[in-house]
Image (cartoon, rainbow, N blue to C red):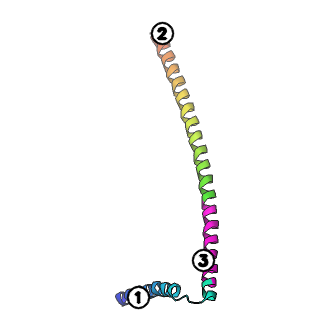
Amino acid sequence: SAQIADLQQKLLDADNGDRAKQRWDSIVTILEAKCALKYLLGELVSSKVQESKLQSSLEQSQASCSDVQKMLMEERNHTAELEAEFQNQILVQEQQHQEKV
């Protein structure tokens, strides 16, 4: 029954694809062409709006990524400075210990 349901769904999907193509192929009047054109222009506007939103989101993400990279570099530099300072303190402690010995 699962296979039958799967095959039925595939047939429905194929029919829907064929119907859409037949709809576009069967436009014969100016009124149908105007309706189709209006629909396509609506889809175009919707796509452009979505593209604009996605572009804005991408730019915000890139700016955020850039900020995070700057913070990471600052933290790495700070960590390197601290490590150098600690190494220097270790050397001083070792010299003091050697002097005491």
Amino acid, disc 2: Lys
Q: Which label belongs to residue 92?
A: none
Q: Quadrant of residue 45?
A: bottom right
Q: Residue at x 57, y 31 (%)?
A: 78
Taking depth in this image into account, of 1 and 54 the one nearest to the observer is 54
| Vertical position of residue 55 compared to residue 79: above or below | below
Nearest to the eye among marks 3 and 1: give it: 3
Q: Position of residue 84 (x, y in %)?
A: 52, 24
Q: Position of residue 27 (x, y in %)?
A: 55, 87
Separation of residues labelled 2 and 1 (CA atoms): 91 Å
Check disc 1 and report the residue beneath it: 11
For the residue labelled by badge 1, is the local secondary structure a helix, a strand or a loop? helix
Q: Quadrant of residue 75?
A: top right
Whichever of labels 3 and 1 marks the residue nearer the N terminus, that label is 1
Q: Position of residue 100 (x, y in %)?
A: 48, 9
Q: Position of residue 70 (x, y in %)?
A: 59, 39
Taking depth in this image into account, of 49 and 94 the one nearest to the observer is 49
Amino acid, disc 1: Leu
Separation of residues labelled 3 and 2 (CA atoms): 88 Å
Q: Split into 4 quadrants, where in the image is the C terminus?
A: top left
Residue range corresponding to the magenta coloring = 34-54
For the residue labelled by badge 2, is the local secondary structure a helix, a strand or a loop? helix
Label 1 Cα crowd, 10 Å radius (few <14 / some 14-19 / many 20+): few
Check disc 2 and report the residue beneath it: 100
| Residue 52 is covered by the magenta coloring | yes
Q: Which label belongs to residue 40?
A: 3
Whichever of labels 2 and 1 marks the residue nearer the N terminus, that label is 1
Q: Residue at x 55, y 36 (%)?
A: 73
For the residue labelled by badge 3, is the local secondary structure a helix, a strand or a loop? helix
